[in-house]
Amino acid sequence: MKYDGDLHPETLMLGYGYDPKRSEGSVKPPVFLTSTFVFPTAEEGKQFFELAYGLRQREPGEDPGLIYSRINNPDLEILENRLAVWEGAESSLVFASGMAGITATVMAHLAPGEIVVTTTPVYGGTHYFMSRMLPRWNMECQWIHAGSRFCDELESLLEKDAERIKMVYVETPANPSNQMTDLKRCVELCARFSRDDHKILLVVDNTFMGPVFQQPLKLGADISLYSATKFIGGHSDLVSGAVLGSQEMIGPISEMRTIFGCMASPFDGWMMLRSMETVGIRMEKQQANALQIVEMLKVHPAITKVYYPGELGEQQDAIWRNQCSGPGSLIAFDVRGGEKEAFLVLNALKLCKLAVSLGGTETLIEHPATMTHSDLNPRDMKLAEISHSMIRLSVGIEHVPDIIADLNQALDVL
Ligand SMILES: Cc1ncc(COP(=O)(O)O)c(C=O)c1O
């Protein structure tokens, strides 16, 4: 994919991939609410299908052609081109949800008998899919704790079972504890244990930091994926997912998306195009607010621990500095006590909204142990370092003293 000169992604978000001449000069892309597209001639319809179904290779400069909105749609294509800019990706796909992107990616690249090695904690839905559903198709998930020791343990597993391990799936920072896993070392390990006929893929869930503060493809990962519901959508008003990588990696996932029919709708695609214009300034402002909130949380007597990049100890900080350009806006913290005390705080908040999800313009707060991560059994919960005193905060763009005042008055009930 070619980008316009040396323009920065934030500049490209305002127009890249859209030609006003093709839409009556409209400065913004319209919403292409259509299920199907008229072929200029029968011959061209035939050619479009040949490409879409992989019946032949694309000729140089050949337009893939619009067919049917389960296969392709202009709003999704423009959005996919823009998303790809941030990570320098060759190809990208948007989905009906983050989980649709994650499940399509794993199902496209894992075969029965093969293993995916996954960080824990991961988002609860990903955990459910990997632990409860993959075994139905004779696919196995092995868990390693996210964080500084992940790569040592991964190396031991690869030494024993590299032939069966097909994928390493890393969520970094991990949801909700913000544990960072060393992506460059993961890239090196996957390459070292791959063979010509058995490539071990590194897949990274980049939802927490991306696309602005971390770009896994630039670090050498094979696939970078997102719950686009979060920072990409950014306004808590839609559910979507995105998957980025080389054409070779994305091809089989595209086949899954076409046949499972789990693509994003044109309207959601259009909403995300609009959101992408502000993703940079939103994420910067949310991060600036989070940095101030962390300073307040660190000294509050009702709090025993704060989980935030840059505050997680020397080894964690080294990994974070090496692969991210900022700490982001997700904070977790433990209150003194347990579930009862955490609930007292959550129920006392007036401005911060008690809701799951993250990355939206407003501050959201939740209790991972009984909400987003409640399906983990006690052993997995312990391994994931999620306690009943933990609260997760997704910081919004409000005037930060207002958020701080709200948190202070709620924490003061303890
Ligand atoms: C890190 C992470 N990955 C994936 C998902 C799943 O995304 P979605 O809810 O859009 O399906 C979530 C949802 O909260 C998440 O936090």
Image: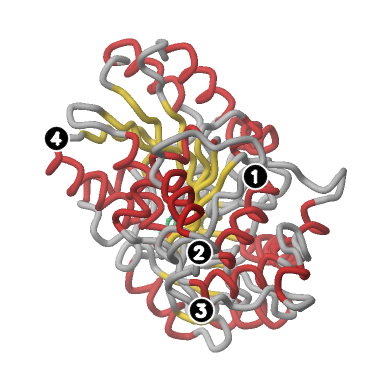
**Foreground disc of the pair 3, 4:** 3
Whether residue 226 is visible: no
Element under disc 4: loop
Q: Amino acid at mark 4?
A: Asn
| Residue corresponding to mark 2 | 39
| Residue corresponding to mark 4 | 138
Given contact means CB atoms under 8 Å apart, are the residues at marks 1 and 2 in contact?
no
Q: Quadrant of residue 355?
A: bottom left
Whether disc 2's CB lies below 8 Å from ligand 1 is answered no
Question: Can you give x and y, in whole percent of width and height, for residue 289 in the image?
Answer: 72, 67
- Mark 3 and mark 1: Cα distance apart in space: 33 Å
Given contact means CB atoms under 8 Å apart, are the residues at marks 3 and 1 in contact?
no
Q: Which mark, by number, is residue 33?
A: 3
Of residues 395 and 130, the one nearer the viewer is 130
**Foreground disc of the pair 3, 1:** 3
| Residue corresponding to mark 1 | 214
Identify which residue is drawn at 40% across, 17% down: 155
Identify which residue is drawn at 53% across, 24% down: 187
